[in-house]
Image (cartoon, rainbow, N blue to C red):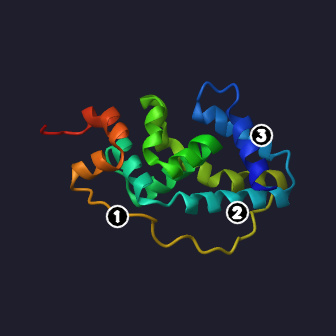
């Protein structure tokens, strides 16, 4: 398992799902069953590396804008969802978080359902081997990259992700 094969698995899992996140999760779970246990462990490691790369303040602001607020746990789920959207969307969002505004509002709201991606690899390992996945020693990134924002200042969300904010401004109580 390498990063290229990982992204291929994600892309394959999205086919014929009509953007249904739960169908995609089922497809991905099924695909993982065709790997050996070392590959599933490596896929988990790649997933965590991608989670760390997406630990960025501007992406957190995007999640906050889309969801009308976003806790630490919510941002974990958002980043997992972002990985599930595939290589192009993921790296596009890392480069420019406002690029997420190109997605439909409905697809963006699905970001709240990203939690299941966090457990998928361990569950697939257990289903394949009837054993728990061995503990993988790692140190997650301690703090987000980039410039921290103030959640009390709506204008910061508008400045960080202007197109995304425009898409969700009706969800925010704004005195223009």
Residue at the spot of label 3 = 30
Residue 168: which quarter of the image? top left
Mark carried by residue 32: none
Secondary-structure class at tag 2: helix
The quadrant in which the C terminus is found is top left
Q: What residue is drawn where x is 25% and y is 32%?
A: 170
Secondary element at tag 1: loop
Q: Quadrant of residue 3?
A: bottom right
Q: How far across and down, in percent of the image, does residue 115 sit? A: 54, 49
- Residue at the location (55% across, 45% down)? 92
The disc, 2 or 1, on the residue closer to the chain's N-terminal end is 2
Nearer mark to the viewer, of 3 and 2: 2
Q: Is residue 74 left or right of residue 33?
A: left
Closer to the camera in the image, 14 or 27: 14
Q: Secondary structure at mark 3?
A: helix
Give the Cα separation between the discs numbered 3 and 2. Answer: 19 Å
Q: Residue at (31%, 60%) from the top-left corner? A: 149
Give the Cα separation between the discs numbered 2 and 1: 27 Å
Circle 2 sits on which residue? Answer: 45
Are circles 3 and 1 on residues that touch, CB within 8 Å? no
Q: Between tags 3 and 1, which lies in front?
A: 1
Can residue 109 be seen? no
- For image coordinates 68% across by 75% down, the residue present is 137
Between label 2 and label 1, give the one nearer the viewer.
1
Please tell me how crowded label 1 is: few (under 14), some (14-19), or many (20+) other residues with Cα within 10 Å: few
| Tag shown at residue 148 | 1
User: Dot 3: few (<14), some (14–19), or many (≥20) neighbours within 10 Å?
Assistant: few
Q: CA distance from mark 3 to mark 1?
A: 39 Å
Q: Where residue 28 sits: x, y (%)?
A: 72, 41
Q: Position of residue 157 (x, y in %)?
A: 30, 49
């Amino acid at each position: 398992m390498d990063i290229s094969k990982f992204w291929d698995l994600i892309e394959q899992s999205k086919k014929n799902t009509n953007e249904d996140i739960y169908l995609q999760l089922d497809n991905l779970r099924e695909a993982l069953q065709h790997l050996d246990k070392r590959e599933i462990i490596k896929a988990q490691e790649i997933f965590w590396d991608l989670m760390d790369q997406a630990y960025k303040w501007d992406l957190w602001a995007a999640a906050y804008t889309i969801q009308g607020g976003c806790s630490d746990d919510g941002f974990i789920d958002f980043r997992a969802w972002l990985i599930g959207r595939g290589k192009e969307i993921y790296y596009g969002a890392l480069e420019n978080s406002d690029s997420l505004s190109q997605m439909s509002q409905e697809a963006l709201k699905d970001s709240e359902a990203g939690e299941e991606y966090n457990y998928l690899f361990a569950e697939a390992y257990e289903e394949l081997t009837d054993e728990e996945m061995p503990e993988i020693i790692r140190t997650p990134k301690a703090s987000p990259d980039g410039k921290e924002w103030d959640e009390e200042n709506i204008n910061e969300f508008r400045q960080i992700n202007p197109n995304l904010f425009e898409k969700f401004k009706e969800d925010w109580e704004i005195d223009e």
